[in-house]
Image (spheres, helix red, strand yellow):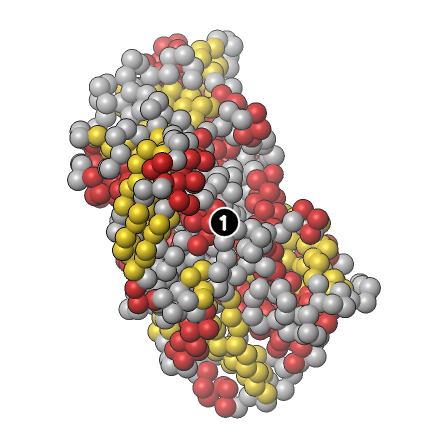
Amino acid sequence: MGLKRMLNVPTDDAGFAPEGGVSRRTFLKVSAAAGGGLLIGFYLPAVRAAPATAANAGAFAPNAFVRIGRDDTVTLIMPQVEMGQGTYTSMPMLIAEELEVDLGQIALEAAPPDDRRYANSLIGFQVTGGSSSVRAMWDPLRRAGAVARVMLISAAAQGWNVDPTSCRAEKGEVIHGPTGRKLSYGALADIAAALPVPDNVALKDAKAFKLIGTPAKRVDTPDKVNGKALFGIDVNIPGMKIATVAACPVFGGKLARVDDSTAMEIKGVRQVVRLDNAVAVVADHMWAAIQGLAALDIEWDEGPNAKVSSADIVRQMETASQKPGVVGRKDGDVAKAMAGAARKVEAVYQVPFLAHATMEPMNCTVHVRQDGCDMWVGSQVVSRAQATAAKVTGLSIEQVQVFNHFLGGGFGRRLEIDFVTQAVRIAKQVDGPVKVVWTREEDIRHDIYRPYYYDRMAAGLDAQGLPIAWRHRVTGSSIEARWLPPAMKDGLDTDAVEGAAAELQYAIPNILVDYVRQEPPGLTTGWWRGVGPTHNIFMVESFIDELAAAAKKDPVEYRRALLGESPRARAVLDLAAEKAGWGQPLPPGVGRGVSLQFAFGTYLSQVAEAAVSKDGEVLIQRVVCAVDCGIIVNPDTVKAQIEGGVILGLTAALFGEITLKNGRVEQSNFNDYRALRISEAPMIEVHLVISAEAPGGIGEPGTVGIAPAVANAIFAATGKRIRKLPVKDQLRSA
């Protein structure tokens, strides 16, 4: 998601939003912590909170990110959630670097829901997504650590009656250089809290970094290995019941009638809850709930979408794609250049609906009382989760407590609150806490899917085969219109064209990118580990390969010829090609394919080697990635994110597809919504470019570029062009 660009938030040189966002001066505030200590807090100017006091600035003060106690504990209250991407390591590294403490000295607390204090500065509210955590917190967290360090040094200097410049901070202590005297941060916390906050503090030069840029072991790994880590699905509240649910199998349908007499006879079944479009069985344990659900006699009112099929949706998109759309980028005169081109190339590319299929299925535990609501969940949008609970229950925001947990996979699925809303509606009818857990079948059949896209590509080539005109029409549903309406500008879904419009790196004199909105009947679409780039890079990089083939030129050399104005893009392309051994011979039936992208502020090139058997089976043997994501916080995390992204992207490219028949999703579990298996996983190499540029995002880029690299490798191996995903079964007739 290019959410910062969607919102068009202006930034200063360091990536801050000085107007309507967060400035350096107004971002940092300091107050005394309850019981003594130093508290560093953050405020958004548009909704500035009242100054913290000793009464409200305690251990869970919602306006603070950093707390230092008399016992020497340093606590970071984390506004970003951990869903496997490494924020619980990278965020503390930013604080520890400037505060001069070891990474192991920092304790973490999950932030409560509060958009005023914990808004993601790039997006505008409290959210983890869009590969934005490091980008959003790079300057604020370092500055918070630096301010705290300066104040602690000042406190020590004041107590010793020495010049602060004669003191330094090191490993949680302030040291007076000439005498060697030392005081711990805890001993200085009370004095430091009473000092004025400096307006400006110097941040470390990158050359002085001790932690940032070095490999750090994930701090969340030990508890995930030994079983101590708590995910939403692990919650166990005294007196808690378990519920599982069946929603109408046709999107937009309603519950007409249910006979629960047989279900209520099953041991452990306590209650059957009816909603407008679903029914839930509440029981003592999950197995009883599942048995009870199977025993229900349900009649559905399937509504207007009962006959919808995938073919219907594609036909609607094909028709819509023939009409001009809202312009996302316009350079030069494409029509004139196309008319004078020596050769024209046209193609239609399609990508399917995709489910998230996170390892941890959707779940939410809720206890609704007359005077309040408690909720335990794993959410990427904890403030939105709180807001929907307040709306459903009629309680005030302050009466809803949300306890956020580790997420067993997010990929954008937990940017949605549909499962939270449903759980609260069920809990309103249950006496005591209830954990609502979706089965895998419910999860896949009622996901909020990555959109289907139907894109028309056209190019005009000059006599040397280089493009002088480029036209790309994106046709698909709009996520922004539903999820982030302010991002829509004059009907343009900026995410839908991300990766195809402003981010296109190739120097082509005449470019037209437009967007046609076409909503699929009944389905709701949402974010999927990058949406715009995951489809647009497939379209762009597959089509640029077609142009190279039409010009009878090497795909890497063809791209190089178009990258004179983008040295960082060319550098990752060259590095990937070099490390992959581009141009070296391969066995028969094996081909190399390349892709190049700029997305989420990161440059990435991938080279895939695909082996295609005589009966059309595809095995990806090797993937080489070159990454320039600007300054790197934790290289181990960057490599892991690229590796994981490649695996998810391969799963989608080779097998991923949600289809509809008679209004119903045909897939139900991993038997028919396949994931890449261990035996099918390729060797993945990740090569990092050392850079002094501002940090780019890393959670989604690895997923983005693998599909076109694979498709182009298949073409190199077989001569067959893949214009529609997934790859499965497309080569069997060849």
Q: Position of residue 201 (x, y in %)?
A: 38, 32
The quarter holding residue 390 reads top left
Q: Quadrant of the N terminus?
A: bottom left
Type of the residue with mark 1:
Ala
Query: Does 159 sit above or below residue 560?
Result: above
Residue under the image location 39 percent in, 35 percent down: 266
Identify whether 105 is placed above or below 528: above
Q: Residue at x 49, y 28 (%)?
A: 229
Q: How many marks?
A: 1
Q: In front here: 262 or 422?
A: 262
Residue at left 62%, top 76%? 546
Q: Is residue 482 above or below residue 32?
A: below
Return the x and y of residue 658 as percentages of the image width and height: 49, 61
Which part of the image, by quadrant, shows the C terminus? bottom right
- Among the 4 quarters of the image, the one containing residue 560: bottom right
Q: Looking at the picture, how far across and down is residue 200, in whole percent?
A: 35, 34
| Helix, strand or loop at mark 1 | loop
Task: Please state which of residues 36 and 537 is positioned toward the viewer in this rendering.
Answer: 537
Badge 1 local density, few (<14 within 10 Å), some, or many (20+)?
many
Which residue is under mark 1?
A: 357
Q: Is residue 235 left or right of residue 577?
A: left
Image coords of residue 325 (percent x, y)? 37, 76
